[in-house]
Image: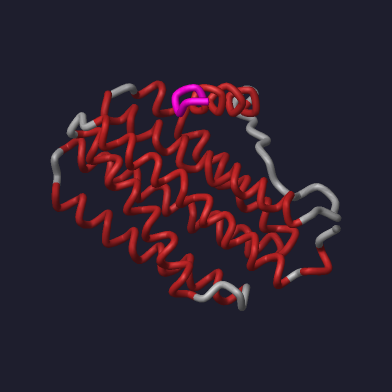
Amino acid sequence: MNRLNRSVLLLVFTIIGLGGCAHEGSSLSDPHPVTVADLQAVLRDEWSRHVFWIRHVVMDNAKGDRRSRDFAEKAVAANARDMAKTLAPFYGDATAGRFRALLTKHDEIIQAYSDATVAGDKRRQEAAIATGASISDEIATLFSQINPHLPKDTVRSLFATNIGHHVAQINKFQDKDYQGEDETWTAMEHHVYVIADTLTNAIAKQFPAKFGS
């Protein structure tokens, strides 16, 4: 299946899931036991939706399509909620809420960079990148505190790379370099699987009793 068809199918399935903006998505808030493969599948889906919907936000912003961007922004917010729900059975609602707040800031920084790029404001672009680095550090600190198998430097690098991909994608859209954007998108898809798998492996090591065979 080519990349266009995969994106169309993902869009259809996600819109079905949104159901009038009451997006349920996938999470592990249902009763245990689950398997490590279940957790990996859920996290990969959630991180795939993270890049998918932010891509639509920045693409719609570059085109000036406010209505479509509003819809995509709601999906981005729902995705952050779903990721927090997935962490809650392991770390509790309070920690999951902290992650959701930080991920929301992460998403907002990407949108701020997109706005600055459309406006041609390099100072705001640089400010967004600097803030993004700070948020990546906060996320890394959180994960390193709650899971001994997630070193701070590893997590910081994962989230910094994710932001770097989004920044590159925004610039490609602004320059109408669609071939370059396609190459960036491929790298983004691969990298979010690395994030999902890193989190999966660390959680499985920390909570082996929570997983069925």
165 and 50: which is toward the camera:
165
Q: Position of residue 38 (x, y in %)?
A: 74, 49
Q: Who's the residue at 53% across and 42% down the image?
A: 48
Q: Main secondary structure of the magenta part?
A: helix
Q: Who's the residue at 48% across and 67% down the image?
A: 155
How many numbered marks appear? 0
- Colouring rule applied to residues: secondary structure
**Residues in magenta?**
1-5
Left or right: 69 with respect to 86? left
**In which quarter of the view is residue 22 placed?**
top right
Q: Quadrant of the C terminus?
A: bottom right
37 and 42: which is toward the camera:
37
Q: Who's the residue at 45% across and 28% down the image?
A: 3
Q: Position of residue 19 (x, y in %)?
A: 65, 24
Magenta run includes residue 144: no
1 and 19: which is toward the camera:
1
Left or right: 89 with respect to 68? right
210 and 70: which is toward the camera:
210
Q: Position of residue 62 (x, y in %)?
A: 26, 29
Left or right: 201 with respect to 192? right
Left or right: 150 with respect to 58? right
Looking at the image, is 34 positioned above or below residue 118? below
Looking at the image, is 193 positioned above or below residue 131? above
Looking at the image, is 188 positioned above or below residue 200? above
Magenta run includes residue 3: yes
Q: Who's the residue at 46% across and 48% down the image?
A: 190
